[in-house]
Amino acid sequence: MLPPSPDRSLVSPADLAQCRQMIRDGSKTFYTASLLLPQRVCDASRSLYGFCRVADDLVDRAADPRAAVDTLLARLDRIYRGAPDNQPADRAFADVALRFAIPREIPEALIEGFAWDAGGRRYRTLDELHAYAVRVAGTVGAMMSLVMQVRDASAIARACDLGVAMQLTNIARDVGEDARNARLYLPLDWLYEESLDAESFLAAPRASMPLSRVLKRLLAEADRLYARSLSGIAMLPPGCRPSIHAARLLYAEIGRAVEMNGHDSVTRRATVATPRKLALLARAVTASLTSAPRSDAPAIASAQFLIDAVATAGQPIHPPRTLDERAQWLTELFTRLEKQGQ
């Protein structure tokens, strides 16, 4: 595929419209938060989501998940060679990956997380669960930081914190649904400490006080990471902060809903009512006006490879303003595509 002209991106309005519909159908919380983003960042975030959604569905619904993973990796290879498949999500992601210099290691890690899902992997410790959450959600946080043009190592670490916190919240909310699909994400060591047998629980999922204590611990870890993410949000461009605060608050509120349900995520599904969502969106705007001290807390250990990948990636290519800038931009674009095709 030929590289785009200085005035035209790889992605078409129709591609963006399809990605927008995917996020609207697939994640109401993420869609609501994205409405607060500046338009260009909003489009890029939806392009990211579109590819993530397609990748997840392809592996999750495949009769042969391993073959689906191989197919995805081949598609990713074509994306990074500047020749994406004739699919809206692939074209949209190729555009974003090129313009914002998203290192290939990040979407590869995301796909690896989907492969872990398909293989029914379980996690003995919290650290092992972190490694999974880093892949399926920390990667998204890191890519979102890049499309907001923030590449600082500390900011990427905190973006991973936020993504992992959201994933832990999802796990706490979906325990019953996951169990009925023969999936279990809770740390096995925590279950053992509560005298809960994993196989017995999967065979007959039920709410219990021991399970409630496990979910309470999981939400406490999510809350710790939500708090740590604040310094990273403060490093984002001012126009992007309300949306990311909204995502943080909306997902954290799901955890509060789990608590209100007595930590029963087996027979009940935690939801956040629309009036509460609107109140949290207003709170997100207010929170974006305050700063948070920079955090030098170490990254989640299993997220360090994402931070290292960003540090060694090339620089993003942004649309030019003057004629001279356009000529330089086009030269850099051809050079980038040539290197990616090697």
Image (tube, rainbow, N blue to C red):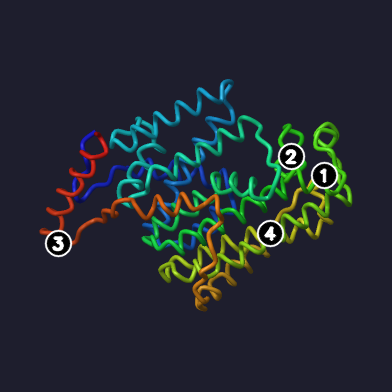
Q: In which quarter of the view is residue 224 placed?
A: bottom right
Q: Residue at x 52, y 76 (%)?
A: 292
- The amino acid type, in three-letter code, at marker 4 is Glu
Q: Is residue 44 above or below residue 19?
A: below
For label 2, the crowd category at 10 Å Cα-Cα, with few meaning under 14, some 14 to 19 and many 20 or more, is some
The answer for how far apart the CA atoms under marks 2 and 3 are is: 54 Å
Position of the C terminus, as image quadrant, is top left
Q: Earlier in the sequence, mark 2 or mark 3?
A: 2
Position of the N terminus, as image quadrant, is top left
Residue 280's disc number: none
Residue 322's disc number: 3
Q: Earlier in the sequence, mark 1 or mark 3?
A: 1
The answer for how far apart the CA atoms under marks 4 and 2 are is: 21 Å
Which residue is identified by label 4?
Answer: 221
* Residue 102 at x, y percent in the picture: 37, 49
Q: Nearer the viewer, mark 1 or mark 2?
A: 1
Q: Residue at x 50, y 67 (%)?
A: 233
For label 3, the crowd category at 10 Å Cα-Cα, with few meaning under 14, some 14 to 19 and many 20 or more, is few
- The amino acid type, in three-letter code, at marker 3 is Thr
- The amino acid type, in three-letter code, at marker 2 is Glu
Which residue is identified by label 2?
Answer: 177
**Mark 4 touches mark 1? (CB < 8 Å):** no
Q: Earlier in the sequence, mark 4 or mark 2?
A: 2
Which residue is identified by label 1?
Answer: 192
